Amino acid sequence: MTLSKALLPSQTLAARALMVLGGAAVIALAARVSVPMYPVPMTLSTLAVLLVGLTMGWRLGFAAVLAYIAEAAVGLPVLAPGSVLGGPTTGFIIGFLPMVALAGLAADLGARRFVPALLASVAASLMIYVPGVLWLDAVTPLSLGGAIEKGMLPFIAGDMAKSVLAALAVSGGWALLGRARS
């Protein structure tokens, strides 16, 4: 059971659709918190993707990220300032799909406590680097080494900190829910 199912036990189609749109909105809002860097900005998007996966599970989380990507594809201002699909950030945005799927799968399998949620978050966070770095290598003048240097290395510490925050938030949510029910 995921945190969203625990909080909303009756999940009608309308409720699930609202959760998917809400998850996409959280990711879009997090993308607006941006530190400009070249060739990709540092944002809170990855934290939001982790939280969406860890709270909603892999199916609803995956749907939320798909909705987010669809919103970007039709031109809605959901990406980090200055980012466009097809630009240098695209590989990382595509990487949100395996990221949310892994975090969501961990939630579906019962990652409620801090350590399991943290391990899932760290593993999920690393998922974005493969498509992100490969995309940078393909669409920019950077070599593969340059893409790693510019698109991965500056982000690892921040992504690990976001993993800790996501695990704290989710394990804290479960703890609060347990106290409220007892």
Image: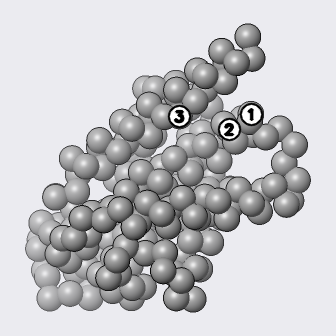
Q: Which of 117 and 73 is in front in this view?
A: 73
- Mark 2 or mark 3, whichever is nearer to me: 3
Q: Please report the residue visible at 14 percent of the width from the left and 88 percent of the height from the top.
A: 141
Name the residue type under label 1. Ala
Q: Where is residue 68 in the image (x, y as percent from the top left)?
A: 56, 71
Which of the 4 quarters of the picture holds residue 8? top right
| Residue position marked by numbered label 3 in the rendering | 170
Mark 3 surroundings within 10 Å by alpha-carbon count, few (fewer than 14), some (14 through 19), many (20 or more): many
Which quadrant holds the C terminus? top right
> Mark 3 falls on what kind of element?
helix
Q: Where is residue 175 in the image (x, y as percent from the top left)?
A: 58, 21
> Mark 2 falls on what kind of element?
loop
> Mark 1 falls on what kind of element?
helix
Q: Please report the residue visible at 25 percent of the width from the left and 49 percent of the height from the top.
A: 158
- Mark 2 or mark 1, whichever is nearer to me: 1
Q: Can residue 62 be seen at all in this image of the molecule?
A: no
Name the residue type under label 3. Val
| Residue position marked by numbered label 2 in the rendering | 2
For marks 3 and 1 on the same chain, the one whose residue lies earlier in the sequence: 1
Mark 1 surroundings within 10 Å by alpha-carbon count, few (fewer than 14), some (14 through 19), many (20 or more): few
| Residue position marked by numbered label 1 in the rendering | 6
Q: Position of residue 152 (x, y in %)?
A: 21, 62
Q: Position of residue 161 (x, y in %)?
A: 29, 41
Q: Label 2 to label 3, Cα distance in Å?
A: 10 Å
Q: Label 3 to label 1, Cα distance in Å?
A: 12 Å
Q: In this view, does 115 lie to the left or right of 137?
A: right
Q: Which of 144 and 54 is in front in this view?
A: 54
Name the residue type under label 2. Thr
Q: Can residue 121 be seen at all in this image of the molecule?
A: yes
